[in-house]
Image (cartoon, grey):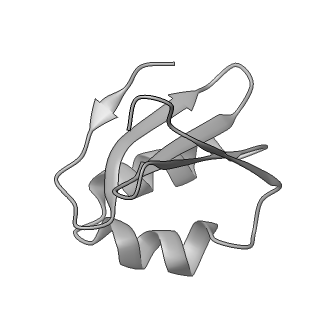
Amino acid sequence: MATVPIASTVLVTIDYDSRTQVLQLEFRDGTIYCYRAVPMEVHQALLRAPSKGTFFNRVIRGKFETTQRTNSLS
């Protein structure tokens, strides 16, 4: 996965593994969510979205299998 730092009030970083289709989002509170079976088009659209939080809530949240963890560096 290649980490992309994000200028967002909600997200800190976005990672995506095209081989496994895992999207990893790090939120400002230090929580990290991994979403499975996310098409590359969704990842690319998230990167282009003017509001990452709005896009996340509309397209990603509750739509993909997810696991949550806390960033141990936070």
- The image shows residue 13 at horizontal and vertical percentages of 35, 41
Answer above or below: position of 74 versus 38: above
Determine the residue located farthest toward the left in the rendered image: 7
Q: Quadrant of residue 62?
A: bottom right
Q: Is residue 5 left or right of residue 70?
A: left
Q: Is residue 39 left or right of residue 46?
A: right
- The image shows residue 43 at horizontal and vertical percentages of 50, 46
Residue at horizontal 70 percent and vertical 19 percent from the top: 19
Q: Looking at the image, which is closer to me, 36 or 67? A: 67
Answer above or below: position of 10 versus 26: below
Answer above or below: position of 72 versus 45: above
Residue at horizontal 83 percent and vertical 55 percent from the top: 65
Q: Looking at the image, which is closer to me, 52 or 12? A: 12
Q: Quadrant of the C terminus?
A: top left
Residue at horizontal 24 percent and vertical 46 percent from the top: 6
Q: Looking at the image, which is closer to me, 44 or 73? A: 73
Q: Is residue 36 left or right of residue 4?
A: right
Q: How many marks?
A: 0
Q: Looking at the image, which is closer to me, 71 or 54? A: 71
- The image shows residue 21 at horizontal and vertical percentages of 70, 33
Q: Quadrant of residue 5?
A: top left
- The image shows residue 57 at horizontal and vertical percentages of 52, 78
Residue at horizontal 39 percent and vertical 79 percent from the top: 54
Determine the residue located farthest toward the right in the rendered image: 65
